[in-house]
Image (tube, grey):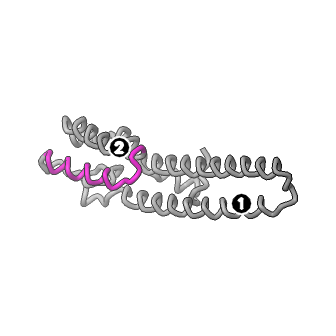
């Protein structure tokens, strides 16, 4: 998959954690869907203009400019959310975690399970896109080890928020 939603070199991409790569893939997919939607709307509009006999009209250029402006606005929001999510999912410094650098949350096995649950829950609920949240949580091997039997409970809770 080509990532053009934000500029990253190959070396920077290789340094991303699994969670960060999933965030990037999801954002790129949303951007591609936005572009596809714009092209479909533009194609439909052009057909309408041509069937009304206004081929030489400036309406097509005006509509394209309007759709591009809306696309750029929505893309800006996507990029901002992606950058924020990449920042909050950065690995913690070693002194804050117990050696699990891939987690975007505090991994401290000395905490009781209830506290671990709250930390992981709050981290995942900070991700606004519910589909992205569930995909990331399902792929989070650290959470499976860290939460133990609470993993399934948190999965159910996160799933209920996605409805």
| Kind of element beneath mark 2 | loop
* In the image, residue 154 above or below residue 101: above
For the point 43% across and 57% down, the residue is 86
Separation of residues labelled 1 and 2 (CA atoms): 34 Å
**Relative height, residue 57 to residue 139 (above, below):** below
Image x and y of residue 144, in percent: 27, 38
Residue pointed to by mark 2 = 162
Provide residue 129's location: percent of width, then percent of height.
41, 50
Say if the magenta span includes residue 72: no
Principal secondary structure, stretch drawn in magenta: helix
Return the x and y of residue 50 as percentages of the image width and height: 83, 50
* Farthest front residue in view: 52
Label 2 crowd bin: few (<14), some (14–19), many (20+), radius 10 Å: some
Residue assigned mark 1:
63
Point out residue 27 in the picture as x, y percentages from the top left corner: 51, 51
**Is 23 on the left-hand or right-hand side of 4?**
left
| Quarter containing the N terminus | top right
Does residue 57 lie above or below 108 as drawn?
below
Tell whether position 116 is magenta.
yes
Extreme residue toward the left, this view: 112
Picture quarter with the C terminus? top left
- Residue located at (42% from left, 62% from top): 84
Q: Magenta stretch? A: 113-131
Residue at 71% across, 60% down: 63
> Left or right of 76: which side holds 97?
left
């Amino acid at each position: 998959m080509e990532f053009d939603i934000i500029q990253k070199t190959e070396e920077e991409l290789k340094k991303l954690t699994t969670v960060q790569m999933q965030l990037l893939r999801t954002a790129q997919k949303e951007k591609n869907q936005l572009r596809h939607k714009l092209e479909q709307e533009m194609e439909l509009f052009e057909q309408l203009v041509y069937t009304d006999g206004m081929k030489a009209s400036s309406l097509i250029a005006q509509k394209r400019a309007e759709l591009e402006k809306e696309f750029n606005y929505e893309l800006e929001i996507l990029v901002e959310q992606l950058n924020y999510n990449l920042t909050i999912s950065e690995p913690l410094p070693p002194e804050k975690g117990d050696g699990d650098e891939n987690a975007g949350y505090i991994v401290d096995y000395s905490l009781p399970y209830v506290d671990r649950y709250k930390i992981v829950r709050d981290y995942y609920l900070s991700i606004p896109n519910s589909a992205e949240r569930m995909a990331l949580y399902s792929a989070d091997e650290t959470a499976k080890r860290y939460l133990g039997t609470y993993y399934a409970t948190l999965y159910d809770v996160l799933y209920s928020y996605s409805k």
